[in-house]
Image: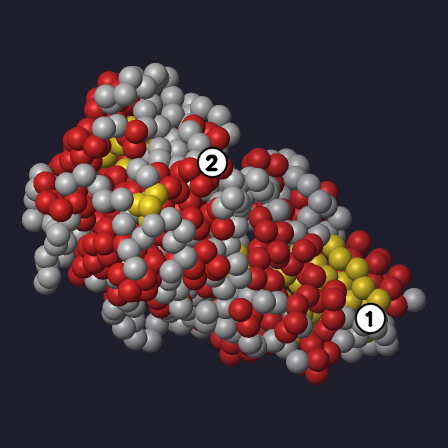
Amino acid sequence: MTAVTPNPASAIPAFCEGIQYFGEDFPDFATYGQSPAIAPGTTAIASPTDKAAVFQTLLAADALRYLILQMTASKASGHPGGFASQAEAYAALVMLGHKNIITEVGHHAPGFYSAMFLDRSLENMGIETVQHLRDRFREQHGLLGHLSGYIPGILAPAGPLGQGQHFAMAAAWLHRDKLFPFTVGDGGLGEPYIVSSMAHFHTAFPAVTNFLPVLVWNGYSQEHHSMVSLQSNQGMIDYWRGNGFAEVILVDAKDFDDQGQVGDYVDSTVFSPAQRLAFTEAVLVGCDRAAKSALGGKLTVLIIKQLKGAGVHAKGAKSHNLYPQHTLDNPDIVGALKTRALTPAAWNLVRTNCERAGGGPAAKTVVTEFVLPLPDLGALALEEFPIGGDPKVSTTAMGKLVGQVGQSDRKYLVSNADGNEASGIANINQALKIIHPTTDPLYNQAPNGQVYEPLSEDACAGLAAGLALMGSRTLWCSYESFAINGLPIWQTVIQAMAELRRPTPSTITLFTAGALEQGRNGWTHQRPEIEAYFAAMMRNGNVFPLFPPDANSIQVCYEWGLSTQNKGIVITASKSPLPIRTSFEQTRQGLAQGAIVLDERAGGKQVVFAVLGDMALVPVYAAAEQLQAQGIGVRIVSVINPRRLYRPDDVAWSTCAQPDRSFATDAEFETLLGGDALIGVTGGASGLLEPIMLRSQAKRDTFAWKRGETTASAGELMNFNGLTAAALAKRAIALVS
């Protein structure tokens, strides 16, 4: 299309300020472009075969391509190619009234921003013109390079591959009457979790099919051909059918090519106008069929096959990324913008349709723009065990409360890949039942259960964290040694919650079977480095690793976690019977100030043991006996909530959507941890002791996990790692001498 001088300024809609090039009318604009295909008071086109609807869907696809390139080239940065190859599919879904659209692909962000601009969602953050769109792309407090919860109308974050389907499935589970399409790149299809997690979800919830994967099959990934680029159409269809998809709808641009393009992947934007419309109509019809199928109870996938970079500055993997030379003066950028340029009248038509679609801007209509109503849990029936009484299993005590929550809130889900019974929380299964197509009372299985048990930690963390992001209560349970496999999506959700523009329940985890309990299993089950992950995340501002020392404490920690919003609450506890050392009130104090004093013994010089965890207290108490016998004073402090022990400036709390500004004061810290010497003790990573080591002025040292080994008992494993009473006492004496 040839770029021409635009109509007089008065004819250009105000939102078009910043558009550099306007074009001539599309052929047949006078016939099919005189009034919006989405009529006033309606939310979608009347028919996917209506000629005006097809014509205006094509305009919307090109408008998206133009805005993507105008915006990204303004900063010579960003990713235009992937979204461009499926612009017709996105435009078709919107024209059909579907706006709860999620993506697997963070590199599709410019396309989603363009869509949010067209339907006026971005006006909520002051982006009213294309110039604003250009100015605030990839800028702080603007449109970051990948999607987040900060952007109006965007349902879920997108960054690492292998995550988007979890958000779509979570939303579909909570909102059975709405469609949740999500785009999947063929480069990302190599992530093994995408299809397997959908297969398990479908087995657990066969009636929930209102999520729709939209495979963007463009032949390329980020820097090279995709691994499925040589797959035949029939082979791709067979792949999805073999993974349980009842309806596989594939629209291949190659079938409409009238330009003799070479290869299996072609660019529809170079077709003749008639064939462009034919392809767009096929996409519209395919999207309509897929949406009705998914909403009608069939597991469905829509595949759009079109060359990566269709309609932008380059083709194939070369279109994926803009480089420093790709400024708005670059010939390839200029040429692509001029080719995609629309008239002011066309821009106005596209915006009107986008705004009307789905009942209004996404920022006012999609499910994540509203707080999900949740049932009141009332007061939990906590059971306070007597201090010094019989040892109790912490996880079992918490499991009883989890059962109460699930029975009060039937949308409450618990996920666990390794089995709740193995973690001392069989009572959760007994109360809530494992979701399984085979009913079996012996194994607490039932189709309508509330315990989700795929064998993938990614799938466990994904559904639990995704549901929390969408506004529901959940609990992800795992062995500490395996949870690392699910943390990438959990971390993504935590960061999104920190930016989210609405309150949502915190995502809570329970990590059990720590390294010290897993001696006989060997180093394969001894991976407490996950705690270093949380140590780093504490500085994010909304992450709270909790270390209850006993079965009383864990109940209060869980109760507190349920009361919080937009946070990541990590509860780590043993599944072994251990002494009761605290009251409920002590843990409430520990949650507020970070730690509590468990034991204090008078003497000369005073040694303070700051202990994370429950089993690590065993050698510390034994060391205290030895030190007391030598006239040295000892204070044993249980560090329950280490994030509280940071100094306020150490943590980005003020940047969080639901800020928690509570930290131990210097006086409180000194009362708890002041002494002549300080020894931090943990059976995990030493990083969690950082807030204490930063603030303490005493001579100090740390005892922490070093590496795994096969042993017959926790005591032997502690000895292997230097966590013994003798070693602790020896170091304490050296520090105070």
Q: Position of residue 74 (x, y in %)?
A: 49, 50
Measure how far apart labels 1 and 2 are at the Cα level: 64 Å
- 281 vs 232, nearest the viewer: 281
Q: Which residue is mark 2?
A: 332
| Residue 435 visible in image | no
Residue at horizontal 27%, vertical 73%?
A: 376
**Closer mark to the observer between disc 1 and disc 2:** 2
| Mark 1–mark 2 CB contact (< 8 Å) | no
Picture layout, residue 131 above or below residue 273: below
Look at mark 1 in the image and give the residue it sits on. 698
Q: Residue at x 38, y 25 (%)?
A: 219
Relative to 529, say whether 365 is above or below. Answer: below
- Asked which secondary structure carries label 2, the reply is helix
Q: Position of residue 303 (x, y in %)?
A: 26, 31
- Residue type, numbered disc 2: Asp
Q: Residue at x 59, y 51 (%)?
A: 533
* Residue 466 vertical position relative to residue 256 in the rendered view, above or below: below
Can the viewer see residue 676? yes
- Disc number for residue 686: none
The residue carrying pointer 2 sits among few (fewer than 14), some (14 to 19) or many (20 or more) residues within 10 Å by Cα, namely some
Q: Amino acid at mark 1?
A: Ala
Q: Residue at x 35, y 33 (%)?
A: 310
| Marks 1 and 2, the one that precedes in the sequence | 2
